Amino acid sequence: MKTVLCLLVFSVLSHSVEGKWNAHAVVANEKYSYEKQEMFPFRFKTVTASPSQMWVTFYYSSGAWGQLRWSESNWGVELYACTDDKLNTTGAGDKLTNVPAGPDRIWEVSWGDEDFSVSCNGNNVWYFKYENRLSKFTENSCDRMYSEQRGSLKTFKFNKTGASGEILNFPTEYYTNDGKEDKKDKKDKKDKKDKKDKKDKKDKKDKKNKKKDKKKKNNAVQI
């Protein structure tokens, strides 16, 4: 999966997407560190329909690697070691559906213990349950790898070329979350905390008053 493309060197960008998401320019075939706290769901942007195929490769701490790829020519999609690889075969394989019109598209890739999904410009375009993997693949090579049960995702890269040397369409940007909460999130958390503190204080006071009342009753009985 090597490529012959002119090397496109981009400077790291600092503009934000939807407030707290920061964009970083992509150099094809370069490995980038993955930090789940700042990068989940995994987001990136494509701005052209040609070449048609996009590949992203994931590298895990276990030494295993996985790959997500699709072809814009017919929206065939493959999750390596889970589904078939018939990207360009009419009527065969898995497909992305209801993909928004381009060329600018922001993709969002998510995974959990049981499934893997892809969204585009806010639309869910592919959902895959690991239990539906092809019979030739194992739970270890599919489910446990992408769910990070075998080992955490450490690095990723957007491939420059495919297995036969074909040129691929790599994204222009990937995104990280700076970890800072926006004002609304902070206010909501503060309001929730204040409400809880107020309730705890009232409960504590009520408990104390009940204890006093009980003591008074006991004293009255003794007299």
Image (tube, rainbow, N blue to C red):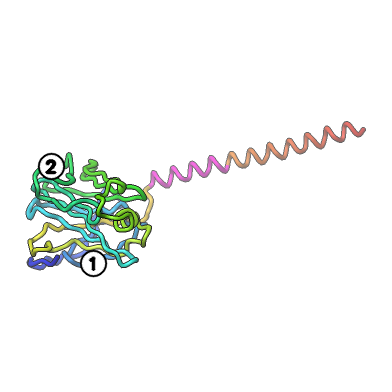
**Type of the residue with mark 1:** Lys
Tell me, for residue 101, which label it has, or none. 2
Where is residue 133 shown, x and y percent of the image? 26, 49
Q: Quadrant of the C terminus?
A: top right
| Disc 1/disc 2 C-alpha distance (Å) | 29 Å
Q: Is residue 178 visible?
A: no
Where is residue 158 shown, x and y percent of the image? 19, 61
Q: Residue at x 53, y 40 (%)?
A: 195
Res. 150 image quadrant: bottom left
Q: Quadrant of the N terminus?
A: bottom left
Q: Residue furthest front?
A: 136
Say whether residue 125 is left or right of residue 213. Answer: left
Tell me, for residue 118, which label it has, or none. none
**Type of the residue with mark 2:** Ala
| Label 2 packing within 10 angstroms: few (<14), some (14-19), many (20+) | few
Q: Residue furthest right?
A: 223
Res. 91 image quadrant: top left
**Foreground: 201 or 59?**
59
Name the element at disc 2: loop
Indicate yes or no whether the magenta region holds residue 76. no
> In front: mark 1 or mark 2?
1
Q: Which residues are magenta?
A: 183-197
Q: Residue at x 34, y 66 (%)?
A: 61
Q: How many marks?
A: 2
**Foreground: 166 or 7?**
166
Where is residue 137 shown, x and y percent of the image? 26, 55
Labels 1 and 2: the sequence-earlier one:
1
Q: Residue at x 10, y 68 (%)?
A: 7
| Label 1 packing within 10 angstroms: few (<14), some (14-19), many (20+) | some
Tell me, for residue 31, which label it has, or none. 1
Q: Is residue 141 visible?
A: yes
